[in-house]
Image: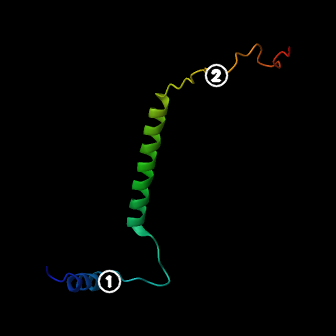
Amino acid sequence: MPDMSASASLAMTHLVTLAEVDKDKVTPGVLGFIVFAVMALAVWGLMKSMNRHMGKVDFKEAADPNAEPATDAGSAPAKG
């Protein structure tokens, strides 16, 4: 298997020379905006899908078979 570290370091030196960075002016640029916009669209799509799936949920809790039946919702159980 050939050693890939030499070619990787050579590729990085060529990329570094292409990216001239002005220390006084560093902005995210167009690429940063595109990445942010794609992430925002992905989150929006996921939220829309989640709302659609949560709308389909029909949850009805089964009655507890060990619970005593309640006589009134607000009254205490009768002593006797």
Q: Secondary structure at mark 2?
A: loop
Residue appearing at x 36%, y 83% in the figure: 20
Q: Amino acid at mark 2?
A: Asn
Figure check: 16 above or below 73:
below
Residue occupied by mark 2: 66
Dividing the picture into quarters, in which one does residue 8 lie? bottom left
Q: Is residue 64 left or right of residue 29?
A: right
Residue 2 in percent (x, y) is at 14, 81
Q: Amino acid at mark 1?
A: Val
Circles 2 and 1 in contact, beta carbons < 8 Å:
no
Which one is nearer the viewer's eye here, 21 or 5? 5
Number of marks in the image? Answer: 2
Q: CA distance from mark 2 to mark 1?
A: 71 Å
Q: Is residue 33 left or right of residue 71?
A: left
**Residue positioned most to the right:** 80
Which one is nearer the viewer's eye here, 60 or 35? 60
Q: Is residue 52 left or right of residue 65?
A: left
Residue appearing at x 81%, y 18% in the figure: 77
Residue 35 in percent (x, y) is at 40, 60
**First in residue order: circle 2 vs circle 1:** 1
Residue occupied by mark 1: 16
Categorize mark 1 by other alpha carbons within 10 Å: few (<14), some (14-19), many (20+).
few
Figure check: 32 above or below 49:
below
